[in-house]
Image (cartoon, rainbow, N blue to C red):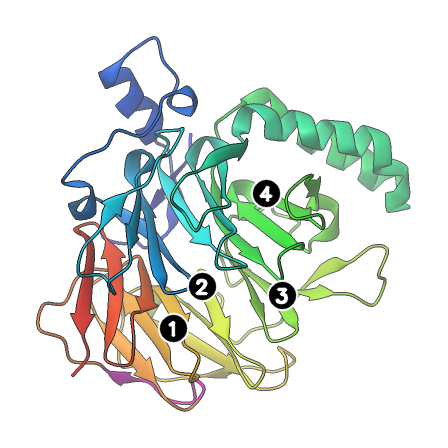
Amino acid sequence: MIKRALGWALVACTVAGSVVGLATAAADNVTRDVLDTPAVKSPLASRTLVNGLARSGERIVAVGQRGHVLLSDDQGKTWRQADVPVSSDLVAVAFPTPTNGWAVGHDGVVLRSTDAGATWTRALDGRQAGALMVDWYKREGATIGDAAKAEAMLKEAERFAAQGAENPFLDVGFENEKTGYLVGAFGLLLRTVDGGASWQPMLHAADNPKAQHLYAVRAVGSDVFVAGEQGLLMKLDRSNAASPQFRAVELPYKGTLFGVTGNARAVIAHGLRGTVLRSTDAGRSWQTVETGLQVGLTGSSIDADGRIVIVSQAGHLLLSKDDGASFAPAQVDKPLPGAAVAFAGAASVIVGGPRGVAALALK
């Protein structure tokens, strides 16, 4: 079983054996699966573990343990809980448009919202994902153009199917309303080009022969990057429109990466030991940016003005106003260990982590 431990337990976003979601469900009701059990509304939900943050227009959406989805329409001053059909732990959330959102997490769950996060429906789960992949490789495997590789991918898909709802999705990212990606444990990688109406596996289209865990997927400028363990960073190669591929990028760092952010001018990747890497040529070359930290940098965000903020597992906030060329510590009254961060305006950020979610004023 898989657990995404967010740094304060071992190191941010590592994968270890666990059954957190299923154990929670068993304690509540041994006969019900977390995938069939709606999230419980709780007045304390904003103080429990939050793993992911996103903006839905002016609204801020947070996701976390036991299927909790929290909404704030006042820049994080108050929060209310959304209606969610599962109680699986949620890890990440993204809104390609102000109304259309996606959330992913343990048990292979994929949720969708069409009303800015107020309500959610289950679009996919781990009981279906493996069969989906098996069906695709049986039907489309010949299009890979390599019979041995196609057979290997079919066997890998069958392995996922046999495991059932065991492997989590760890991030979701969209290029636009129609084209998006899911990434997760043991190299899970799926793509949609029809706004989530269907998903296609891309196990065969990724330079990830060791099936390393994939922690982040982001559209940055006109490119798409996937970050993972052991220094794995891949960039989408669109040179063959009929068969796009995620190609590995050579980096000056071989440790785990937890996030990617940036804009058309610069791409930023961050991870263990205070590592920040920057590219100004669309990922062809990378430079290390000094942070002065030796802790895991677990979440990041960029605002409309190009400011970049990165949060650490120990509660540090790093702020850049020069497209990531340099980062300076941001002073806040009550630092929080963070898994995710989002801008809440010109002078504050929202941080989510093991102590819940809170708005922090930037000094």
The span from disc 3 to disc 1 (Cα, nearest Å) is 20 Å
Amino acid on which disc 2 is placed = Gly
Q: Can you name the residue that lies furthest to the left here?
A: 333
Residue under label 2, please give it: 259
Residue under label 3, please give it: 224
User: In this image, 179 relative to 290: left or right?
Assistant: right
Q: Give the main secondary structure, helix, strand or loop, of the magenta stretch.
A: loop
Q: Earlier in the sequence, mark 4 or mark 3?
A: 4
Q: Position of residue 92 (x, y in %)?
A: 42, 50
Q: Residues within 10 Å of mark 1 (few under 14, many from 20)?
A: many
| Camera sees residue 255 | no
Number of callouts: 4
Name the front one of labels 4 and 3: 3
Q: Residues within 10 Å of mark 3 (few under 14, many from 20)?
A: many
Tell me the quarter of the picture where residue 76 sits: bottom left
User: In this image, 51 relative to 267: left or right?
Assistant: left
The span from disc 2 to disc 1 (Cα, nearest Å) is 11 Å
Residue under label 1, please give it: 275
Q: Earlier in the sequence, mark 4 or mark 1?
A: 4
Q: Residue at x 89, y 43 (%)?
A: 143
Element marked by disc 3: strand
Taking depth in this image into account, of 273 and 127 the one nearest to the observer is 127
Q: Earlier in the sequence, mark 2 or mark 1?
A: 2
Element marked by disc 4: loop
Asked if the magenta segment contains residue 325, the reply would be yes
Q: Can you name the residue that lies furthest to the top here?
A: 31
Q: Residues within 10 Å of mark 4 (few under 14, many from 20)?
A: many
Amino acid on which disc 3 is placed = Val
The span shown in magenta is 323-329
Q: Residue at x 24, y 54 (%)?
A: 353
